[in-house]
Image (cartoon, grey):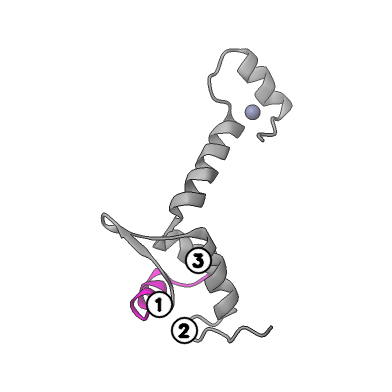
Amino acid sequence: MTVHTPECIARSKAGRSLCLCEIAEVQARRRERVGLTLAEAAVRLSVSPDTLRQQVKNGRLAATKIGPLWMVALAEVDRYAKASSGRPGRPRKVVA
Ligand SMILES: [Zn+2]
């Protein structure tokens, strides 16, 4: 459910088809499905894109090539962040 700011409500009354919060929500939903580019994932994981590309090559990070871009699902970014725990290249063993 979209939460609208008062400004937004005023704007949609003025006749805009999509308010800013709806646009943000659509973009968030698209990201959820498609994921992040390798560069975006690298920023989120605080590693260099080259490091991440290496991780994909090593099979430590699952990524899908779409056209010229490697895309990483959000869930995979989260999983990788937890698994590597700040040490990309040496994923920590999951302790139950
Ligand atoms: Zn709104």
> Could you tell me which residue is drawn at 69 percent across and 83 percent down?
96
Q: Is residue 68 left or right of residue 84?
A: left
> Could you tell me which residue is drawn at 47 percent across and 50 percent down?
33
Q: Residue furthest right?
A: 6
Disc nearer the start of the sequence (2/1): 1
Vertical arrangement, residue 62 with respect to residue 26, above or below:
below
Residue 75 image offset from top left, x and y in percent: 53, 62
Residue at mark 3: 76
Secondary structure under the numbered disc 2 in the rendered image: loop
Bin the neighbour count of mark 3 within 10 Å (Cα to Cα): few under 14, some 14-19, many 20 and up. Answer: some
Labels 2, 3: front one? 3
Bin the neighbour count of mark 2 within 10 Å (Cα to Cα): few under 14, some 14-19, many 20 and up. Answer: some
Q: Cβ–Cβ below 8 Å for labels 2 and 3?
A: no
User: Quarter of the image holding residue 92?
Assistant: bottom right
Bin the neighbour count of mark 1 within 10 Å (Cα to Cα): few under 14, some 14-19, many 20 and up. Answer: some
> Could you tell me which residue is drawn at 40 percent across and 77 percent down?
55
Cα distance between the residues tagged 2 and 1:
7 Å
Residue at mark 1: 55
Cα distance between the residues tagged 3 and 1:
12 Å
Residue 73 image offset from top left, x and y in percent: 47, 60
Residue 89 has which mark?
A: 2
Amino acid type, residue under disc 3 in the picture: Glu
Disc nearer the start of the sequence (3/1): 1
- Queried whether the magenta region covers residue 3, the answer comes back as no
Amino acid type, residue under disc 1 in the picture: Gln
